[in-house]
Image (tube, rainbow, N blue to C red):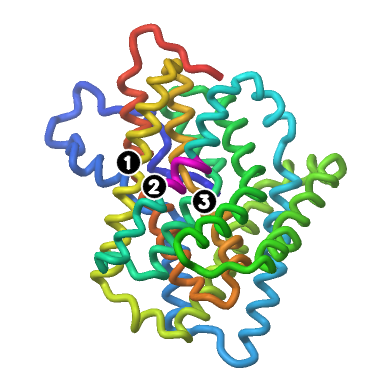
Amino acid sequence: MSVPAATAPTTTAPGPSMPSSRKPSTVLLWLARLKPDTFTLLLVGTVVLASFLPAKGGMIGVANGATDVAVFLLFFLYGARLSREAVIGGLTQWRLHLLVTLCTFALFPLVGLALKPLVNLDILTPDLYLGVLFLCTLPSTVQSSIAFTSIAGGNVAAAICSASASNLLGMVITPLLVGLLLAKAGGGFSADALTSVFVQLLLPFVLGQLLRSRIGDWVARNKKVLGPVDRASILLVVYGAFSHAVNEGIWHQLDLASLLKVVLVDGGLLALILVLTTVISRRFHLSRADEIAVVFCGSKKSLVSGIPMANVLFAGHAVGMIVLPLMLFHQIQLMVCAVLARRYASNHPPGYVAAE
C-alpha cells in the first residue's frame, strides 16, 4: 500500500523574493499534510457503495467466493514479494527488532485489554471494543513504516527487517493472540477460525515464498501492474464485510456520536503508543536512527493484513463493525506519522547522517 503524497518530503521552498502574501500559511501547510490518501478515499467509497447497494440474495455467495479468491491472491503475492534476505540480514540488530516485536505483539494487546472498561462506561459497544482489541493484535505495516522512517532520517535497513519480520510473525501470532484476548475479554472464538487462517492466509503465503525463486523477479518487474491487485483485494473484502453488516443493520446500531468516540479512542491509543515507544527507545539508549525505526515500526497496524484476517477469524460475526476501528486507525496513523516524520527530519542535530 502506498503512502499518501502528503508524506513525501518537501523538496522546494519559496524563493527569498517571493512576496510574503504569496507564501502558503502554516495552517494551510499543516492541513495539507492531513489530506486523506487515495486508498482511504477508495475505502470510504466502498463503504458508501455497500451501504446503498449491499450484496443480497444470490450475490452474497458470489461476493463471498470472490473475496476468498482475492484474499488467497493477496497473500500469495505478498509471499512472493517478501525478501527473506531482508529479514535474515537484520538479525544482528536484535535489540531493535525485539523492541518492535514486543511493542507490536505485547504492548499494544496489553493496552487493548486495559481499554475494556470503555464498554462498561458506554463509550464503546462490545463489537467496537472487539474491533479495537483486534487491531491491537495485528502486525506492523511495511511500506508506510519504511517510508516514514526514511523521511525522518532513521535506520531504513532496520525498518525493512523489522516490518517484514512483523508481518511474517503476524501470520501466526495474530490468530493466537485473538483467541487468547477474546477469552480474556469474554468473547467467543473457535478453533476452526485458527484452522481457516492457516488454510486461507498462511498456505498461500507459504506457496508464494516457495515459488519466489521462480516468480519473484517477474513480480518485482510488474510491481506497478500488480500493485492495484492488493488494493482491489482489500476493497472487495471491505465490500463483502460491510454488505453483511448493512444487511444486519449496522447503521441502525452505529450513530455519529459512536463513530466520533471510536476516532477519539483510536487517536488516544496511537498517541499513547507513540509516547511509550519513544520513552522505551531512550531507556534502552538506542541511537537516534534506531529510535526512529522503533517508533514508526512499533506504532503501526497493518490494514492490508488486518481486514482479510478479520474476514476469516470473525466469519459469521459483525465483521464490518469489527474492522471499522482498524480503518479509522489506518488513516489516523498516516496523518499523525506524516507530521511526526517531518518533525524528526527538521530536528536533526548538526552533522547527522541517517543510517541506511
Residue found at the far left of this picture:
21
Classify 227 as above or below 119.
above
Cα distance, mark 3 to mark 2? 11 Å
Mark 1 or mark 2: whose residue is earlier in sequence: 2
Residue 105 on the magenta span? yes
Cα distance, mark 1 to mark 3? 16 Å
Q: Amino acid at mark 1?
A: Leu
Classify 239 as above or below 16.
below
Classify 294 as above or below 300.
above
Q: Quadrant of residue 310?
A: bottom right
Q: Are marks 1 and 3 in contact (CB under 8 Å)?
A: no
Q: Amino acid at mark 2?
A: Val
Q: Amino acid at mark 3?
A: Thr
Which residue lies under the disc numbered 3? 137
Answer few, some or many: residues within 10 Å of disc 1's Cα (few below 14, many 20 plus, some between 14 and 19).
some
Q: Are marks 1 and 2 in contact (CB under 8 Å)?
A: yes
Q: Residue 153, position in %: x, y? A: 44, 23
Which residue lies under the disc numbered 2? 111
